[in-house]
Amino acid sequence: MLLKPHVWTRAGWSGTVAMRSEEDWATWFQSYRRFILHYADLAERCGIEALAVGTELGGTIRREREWRSVIADVRNHFHGSLVYCANWAEDLHQVRFWDALDWIGVQAYYPLSHRREPPLSELVRAWRQPFADLNRLSQRWGKPVVLTEVGYHSLDTAASRPWEWELAGTLSLDTQARCYEALFRVLPEQPGVRGVFIWKWHPDYSRAGGPADTEYSPQRKPAEGVLARAFAEIERDAR
C-alpha cells in the first residue's frame, strides 16, 4: 500500500508551484515539511508500506538541499519505503535526489497514439521507448522504478493525451481497456520497473465508473477485467 498525498492549488497544476524569493522558499518548505510529516506519522501508525514524499512538484525539485532535508526528516517519522512521484515529461530527469529515496516514481501518462481507437499492436509498440528510458534511469540510480500513476479516459482519444483531465473524444470503453492491456503486455519484460498504481479507483464502487462514464475510473467497465487478470497474474508470479 502506498500513501500518496497530493498538493492541490486554486492556481492550477501543482507542477507550476514556484517561489519568487529565498524567503518565500523557506516559508514554503517549512509549511510543506509540516504537511508531509503529518502524513508520515499517519503512515507509520497505520503500518502502510510506502509513502510518497511529493507528487508532481516540478517547480520545487531544483531545491535539492531542501528536499534532502525533508526526506531525512520523513525517515525519522516513517520507516517504510519512500518515493517521489515525478511527472513523466517535466521533472523525471531533473530530480537529483533519487539516491535519498527507495523508489523512482513516475506519473506515467505517456502519449501512445494520436489515432482514435488505436489497435493493441500499436499501443504495445508505443510503450517500448518509455520503458527503455525508465530501465536506463533505474540502472543509473540503482533504484527500482514504480509507475505511481497510470490512467486513461474511456474515450476513443484516450491514448493521445492521457494526462489531460478534460480530454475531448467519444465514449470508447474498448480503447481504455486496450491501453491497459498494452501496458501489462510489456510490463513483465521490464527489469527496472517494480510496480504500478492505477488512476483512478473510487471507494464507492456502486457509483464509480460504469458503461456510460468517460472518465478515468476503470470500475464496472471492460478495463476492470483487464486489470483484475493482470494483477492476478502478477500475484501468481510473485509466489
Image (cartoon, grey):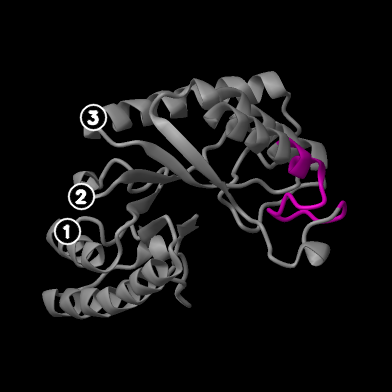
Of callouts 2 and 3, the N-terminal one: 2
In what element is the residue under mark 3? helix
Q: Distance between the residues labelled 2 and 3?
A: 14 Å
Q: In the rendered view, would you say 5 is above or below 209?
A: below
**Percent of width and height locating residue 108:** 49, 42
205 or 165, which lies in front? 205
Query: What amino acid is at disc 1?
Result: Arg
As drawn, the label of residue 31 is none
As drawn, the label of residue 68 is 1
Query: What amino acid is at disc 3?
Result: Arg
Residue drawn 34% across and 69% down? Answer: 40
Would you name the residue on which mark 2 appears? 100
Would you name the residue on which mark 3 appears? 140
Q: What stretch is highlighted in magenta?
A: 211-226
All told, the count of numbered labels is 3
Residue drawn 77% across and 53% down? Answer: 214
Query: What amino acid is at disc 2?
Result: Ala
From the viewer's perspective, tell me whether residue 115 is left or right of residue 129: right
Q: How far apart are marks 3 and 1 (CA)?
A: 19 Å
Name the front one of labels 2 and 3. 2
Q: Distance between the residues labelled 1 and 2?
A: 7 Å
